[in-house]
Image (cartoon, rainbow, N blue to C red):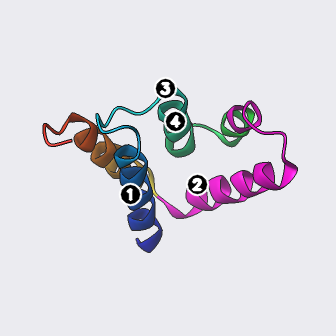
Amino acid sequence: MKLAGALVLLGAALLLTSGGDCGLCPVIDRKVELFFHGNLEDYLQHVKEYTNNPVLVEEAERTKTCVDSNLTEEDKTHITNVIERIKASPYC
C-alpha cells in the first residue's frame, strides 16, 4: 500500500502545481487515466508522443508494469477517486 500512497501524493502534487484551479491539463489527465486504467502499449504510445528519450520510455514501462502487477483494480479506482475528489473540491 506504500506504492499506492506515493502515487496518490504524486497525483495531488500534480493537481496542486497545475495552476491553482485544480484542473489537470488534458495531456496529464489522459496520462493519469492511461497509467492507472490503460494497457501498457497505449500508455507507452502516449509517453512516446512527448519524448523520444529511450531512458524515459524504459522507465515509464518499468513503472507501469510495477503498478499493474502490484496494485489491484480496487487500489487504482481508489486513487482515481481521490484525484477526482481533489479536482472537484471547492477549496482547490
Q: Which residue is mark 3?
A: 26
Spatial CA span between label 2 and label 3: 23 Å
Snapshot quadrant of residue 23: top left
| Residue 35 position within the rendered picture, expressed as x and y whole percent measured from the top left | 56, 44
Horizontal side of 19 relative to 89 (left or right) equals: right
Q: Earlier in the sequence, mark 1 or mark 4?
A: 1
**Three-letter amino acid code at the position of disc 1:** Val
Quarter that holds the C terminus: top left
Q: Residues within 10 Å of mark 2 (few under 14, many from 20)?
A: some
Residue 89 - label: none
Considering every residue shown, the one lying at the far left of the view is: 90
Q: Earlier in the sequence, mark 3 or mark 1?
A: 1
| Residue 46 position within the rendered picture, expressed as x and y whole percent measured from the top left | 68, 32
**Three-letter amino acid code at the position of disc 2:** Asp
Q: Residues within 10 Å of mark 3 (few under 14, many from 20)?
A: few
Horizontal side of 51 relative to 4 (left or right) equals: right
Q: Which residue is mark 2?
A: 68
Circles 2 and 4: CB atoms closer than 8 Å: no
Kindly report which numbered mark, 2 or 1, lies closer to the viewer in this rendering. 1
For the image, the number of numbered tags is 4
Given residues 37 and 58, the one toward you in this image is: 58
Residue 28 - label: 4
Residue 61 covered by magenta stretch: yes
Considering every residue shown, the one lying at the far front of the view is: 19
Residue located at (54% from left, 64% from top) = 70
Q: Which residue is mark 1?
A: 8
* Tag 2 secondary structure: helix
Residue 11 covered by magenta stretch: no
Residue located at (23% from left, 42% from top) = 85
Snapshot quadrant of residue 41: top right
Residue located at (66% from left, 56% from top) = 65
Q: Which contiguous range is marked in magenta?
A: 46-71
